[in-house]
Amino acid sequence: MALLLIAGLTAAVVTRQSGHGTSVPTALSGASRPSADQPTPSGGQPGPGQKGQKQPAKRPATTMKPPPPPASTTTAPPPTVPPAGKAHTPTAIITLPGPIAATVVQAVRGLKGVEAVEVVDVGTVVLQGAPAVTVGVDPGTFRNFTPEVTASADRLWQYIASGTLASSFEMSRDRQLALGAEVPVVAAGPGPTTKQWLGAFMSVGLPGIDLVVSRQMSGPLGLASGAGLVVSAPSADPFVLQSAVKSVAHDASVVLMRPGLALGSAPGHGSGGGVTAGQLSTALTAAVSRLGKPYVWGGTGPNGFDCSGLVGWSFAAAGISMPRTAAEQALAGPAVAVSQLQPGDLLFWAYDPSDPGFIDHVAIYLGNGQMIEAPQTGQTVHVIPLQRNHLVGAVRVNPTVSARLGGPWLR
């Protein structure tokens, strides 16, 4: 599952005149969606030689359409959003059932290695019939926790501040969302269904986050106010940070957001023993039993899966707890050289050339040069030869470490 950008396309941007008199940036190539029967390396159907595995899409950093004008005859100016400030690399997101107390926020801010924190609203809405993990943010400050190309897109943050929904490119592609349309959204809870304007696709840079909205939209969407905290501690050991946070917020869920930067570096990976032969056999048998099941966005089985959902479901059958996203699963054990792969090892890909530490996709190695994966929307779980293009590494699962990472988050 990829959040994808165009590499080196900074100059290849033009503006088009929208129906509301606003110039909107659009890419010279890749911004328009291909028709359903047009195979393309960036679309939902595999092109020649792709063997069904998802490929990096040719996309700009952001794709936008302005919100519809208000009912009044006077068009209000776009909201003022502070310019991008110092960039912060997101390391973890902390969630609690209710608002995080100011004392806890201050305590986390004071932990060793923490450079910045950002309070957000969190929840899972249902967008066009499928779950979408959503954060409500202050556009002027949260932008500094996103990739540089996204943080610098002023109009994007103005649109978000005006009430538009901004989808991750990953979700927009996999679910074939239409840009610039009113879409049905069931509020978290679940709550009432409303129509909301889907006005932007963006590279979020945070694993597992599907939608970004302004905090003014959090109430209508049923998000838990102030229940999330994004933490930037790029020099901290992720597991040490996780333990430190839990020492000041005992009931907190601490999800590591950028494990791709430390693929397979989890401390203590030698403790507790590895996967037993019996567990390995059970996990691989479970995975292969799902052949032909459809790829489903957010799917965790048993009849539909996304890539990390297939991994989690298969290892759960063997009694091994796995985290929810591919990026988190990259911390589930020690790194393994591709030349030393064994059946059951996890394989990881990164497709975003502007964010090479972002893990987009995971598959399970079966042995003999074969792997099993849940590829993308429109395809099914299948076995294919090991794909080396954009492969960034492999991990050998350690049950003790994977259990420490935790199970599914918000889905």
Image (spheres, rainbow, N blue to C red):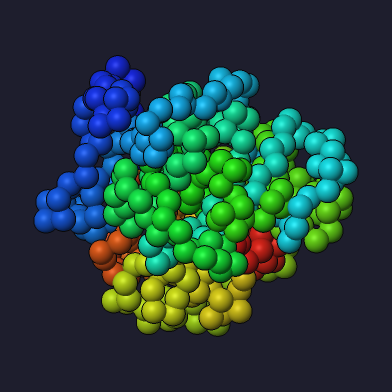
Question: Residue 57: where, in percent of width, then height?
Answer: 29, 42
Horizontal side of 75 relative to 326 (left or right) equals left
Residue 106 vs 326, above or below: the answer is above
Horizontal side of 290 relative to 262 (left or right) equals left
Give me the residue at 66% from left, 44% from top. Answer: 120
Question: Residue 3: where, in percent of width, then height?
Answer: 41, 43
Question: Residue 113: where, in percent of width, then height?
Answer: 77, 34
**Residue 329 in sight from this viewpoint:** no
Residue 63 vs 181, above or below: the answer is above
Question: Considering depth in this image, is 167 or 155 the residue closer to the camera?
Answer: 155
Give me the residue at 39% from left, 52% from top. Answer: 171
- For the C terminus, which image quadrant? bottom right
Give me the residue at 86% from left, 52% from top. Answer: 247
Horizontal side of 135 relative to 5 (left or right) equals right
Question: Residue 87: where, in percent of width, then height?
Answer: 60, 25
Quarter holding residue 103 = top right
Horizontal side of 157 relative to 69 (left or right) equals right
